[in-house]
Image: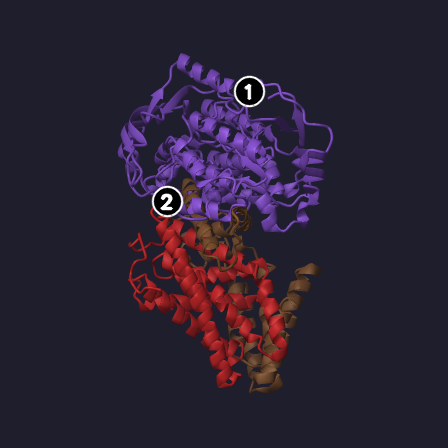
Amino acid sequence: MTDVSITDFTYQYPKSETKVLNNLNLTFKHNHFSLLSGPSGSGKSTLLYFIAGLYPRFIGNDATGTIKFGQTNLKDIPLNQISRQVAMMFQNPNQQFAMDTVIHEMTFVLENIRTEPAKMDAIIDQALTFCGIQQLKSRIINTLSGGEKQRVALACIVAMDTPVIVLDEPFASIDPGSRIDLIHKLKELQEKHGKTIILADHDLGNYQGIIDEFYYLDPKSHRINLLNQQEAQHFFDNFESTQTINKQLNLPPKTDAQSILKLRDFKLSPHDSLLLKLDHFNFYKQKTTLITGANGIGKSTLFNALTKLLPYTGTILYTDKNIKKIKPLNYAKNVTLLFQDAENQFLNVTVKEELDLSFANRFNQDYTHEQVEQMLTKLDMQGRDDQVVYSLSEGQKKKLQIVEMLIMNPPVLLLDEPFKGLDYKSLRLITGFLETAKTKYGQTQIVISHQLSGLEDLIDYHAHFENQNLTYQGVI
Amino acid sequence: MENKTQTSNHQHQSKWTLRNIILIALIAIFCGIIFWGIGFLYTALTVALTPIGAAPFANDILMGLWCMAGPLTGFLIRTAGSAFLGEFLGAAVEVFLGGQWGAGAFISGLVQGVGSELGFTLTGYKRYDWVSLNASILTTVIVTFAWDMYKNGYNKFALPLLIGLFVTRYISTFIFGGILTKMIVKLLDRSNAFSL
Amino acid sequence: MNPGMKLLLVVLIALEISFTQSLIVNVILIAVSFAYVMVKRMNFKTLFLLVFWPLFPALGLFVSQWLYGSAGIHFAWVLFTRIYAYVFLGATFTLTSSITDLSLTLEQDFRLPSKFAYGVLAAFNLMPKIREEVQIIKTSALMRGEVFHVWSPRLYFKAILSSIQWSQNLAEAMTSHGFVEDEPRTHYKVIRITALDWTVFIVLLIAVQVMLFLIRY
């Protein structure tokens, strides 16, 4: 029996005031599928890293309290035995493989746990078959999609055959088909192979009826509660209701007259698999266009093409000029991306330096210093001048990033999941700022967002990404 | 540049952990890829200088860039051998990217690696400041120059030309391996990048 | 041939001809290496690039030596052919060996600690992502109105920040995949240095010594 029991467990990051995990007492039961939910950045990952034996090894300080696997304290398990007990699947599919191909990675894993070479072929074939990816065996991992990479990650875990499997937001960037499939595979591992599954996810889709236990990490108390049937149902219903907002919208005009970005005979196929094909598509000036679509379908990839980060075939015209003929700096000033990862936007060290950079390099003088100061105050970001941007919380990074790009005030702003990790109040403030940028300064905005509630007033048009196509919809 | 030991939040010695090895390799590859982009600049300089027989200057003007990964990794990961590994891997990347030097880059990598490492050896892997960085620059310039005496036939040049090349190389290495490295380290220190 | 032995041989020969001045031996090395990569089937474009890019540094060295060198035209030609000898010797390794196999033999036969073999290999396997990252850093700078050059400290600053994050992620992932530093591992693909490898290595190395001794021009 390998119950994972956590006793009097408290952790706080070095140099941080708050206890991100505060006196936890709970048991993830043997042979159960446990879901751990809670807002992003609330400390779910941290707990999982401790359970997987990666912390404190890979972090500056230790936690207090104990984690036990069955009767054994995790700390008493020698390093070379931990991976016989627990394996982990990570959020970022790109940085979890050491080797070039799938088969090399899987042999690497088995060599690490000192499997006899003669037995490896059978184990690998079995694991690949279980995950339904025999055809990927000799493929180069770098050329796989996010969904395929996570299946490979699962195959590695299946090959390791550990009693406990820990997964940290493993579906954040993969397509819904892979997501559903992987959730069912995990269920099968639990039911038919007796595994204990602990999975952290803030997205509650597809778990109902599958999971055995629903834990919630409360961001205020920093404690974890086991929810009863009724409470769990409440969370599921709540999540469901945020998935649509049922608002009627106009369709854009049929003419090209008001368009600012035009895609013609456009084809996007990274790694030779077609993601998007658009013969004739326009984005419209001084409008906010929302792009929706499943994870991993290619929305961010489209933004990468629009910002010349990725090659494409066909033509993209910005104000009737082929973007390939516009000088890089000039184009970047006109069509700017608000990166999904806020850190990508930062070039300097402190908050003040970041803001000063935007003021120094902005393309117009539309915002006064007072206006910016007001925005920061409203967002509760005032007085942080000397703080290092990389030490801000995820939500604070996002707010700073948005303010500095508002200061830049480019004619076209692409926003990739701009509201991720923001509380509702900040979201409403920011949609207000964006509304001003559009109506007062004529900005065109194209938004990718899973978060829909709260955006009703901002959105003018809605384009849905499906079946390698992007089509305008009359409703959100 | 001030000559004081202000540099760092991470006063501890580093160890050869898996993570540090990957880190050195990643920094080296980043440097290799960034420099690879200026391969054409080197070629252009060479073409421009060839008619007057001054092509070796192209090599010496850009030497500092090619020798940057060493001081950088040596300074950031504070343990014996890190500068050597960083510099060598930086050069090896060029080989695999299809650079124009072939096996020569491996050897240059070894020589440059020894050059940058020596500076940190001389300061006993104890101090990581402007002094040890300068020691590394000095040893890099001397070792690589000695190597080019043979490899690129510098030993057949007259003294004035030799001095010209040496000074060029020193300035280049000082700017990239010294000043630029120092500026990068300062940014990293200010942002507490290493206090994970 | 065992990739580790091959690399060692190539580096030893390249090192040696850096100090010798035999034009003919350089040409022979180029010819033999060229024949070797042709047998291993190289495409025409790779070959063209292999000849084209080194032309500039080779010519540059040649002209300067010819104009200012004290050793005359023969030495200029030695330097010219030396560049090409490096390139083709290098090609015999890079075009025909895999980095993965090199890591395996370094771990198994050359007693390199596995954390070096696999740590460096893992980083190399991220090379395509690193290229993309450099592009993202440069583009995001443009979007803030800044142009990054090879001498911009912040370009390296951002690259190192990514390196720190990625090295942490990779090390954690490898650890979670059962890798433990300095612990014994089993080996699925056993790479040995065979008697044939030794023979080829010694014979070729001696052949080069003999040639260098006999052929002084």
Where residue A153 appears, as percent x and y from the top left, is 50, 37
Residue to which mark 2 is pinned? A388
Would you identify the image quadrant in which residue A60 lies?
top left
Along the line of sight, the residue nearer the viewer: C182 or A354: A354
- The lab-note entry on whether marks 1 and 2 share a chain reads yes
Q: Residue at x 44, y 66 (%)?
A: B175
Mark 2, Cα crowd under 10 Å, few <14 / some 14-19 / many 20+, is some
Q: Answer above or below: position of A9 versus C116.
A: above
Along the line of sight, the residue nearer the viewer: B139 or A418: A418
Would you identify the image quadrant in which residue B152 lies?
bottom right
Quadrant of the snapshot with the C terminus of chain B? top left
In the picture provided, is A314 more to the left or to the right than C79? right
Secondary element type, mark 1: loop
Indicate the chain coloured red by its letter: B
Along the line of sight, the residue nearer the viewer: C217 or A239: A239
Q: Earlier in the sequence, mark 1 or mark 2?
A: 1
| Residue A325 numbered tag | none
Along the line of sight, the residue nearer the viewer: C127 or C35: C127
Where residue C145 appears, as percent x and y from the top left, is 53, 49
Residue to which mark 1 is pinned? A244
Q: Residue at x 51, y 17 (%)?
A: A241
Residue A474 visible? The answer is: yes
Indicate the chain coloured purple by its letter: A
Where residue B21 appears, as percent x and y from the top left, is 41, 53
Indicate the chain on which mark 2 is placed. Answer: A
Give the residue type at disc 1.
Answer: Thr
Indicate the chain on which mark 1 is placed. Answer: A
Q: Answer above or below: position of A102 versus A327.
A: above
Q: Answer above or below: position of A109 versus A379.
A: below
In the picture provided, is A262 more to the left or to the right than C9? right
Indicate the chain coloured brown by its letter: C
Mark 1, Cα crowd under 10 Å, few <14 / some 14-19 / many 20+, is few
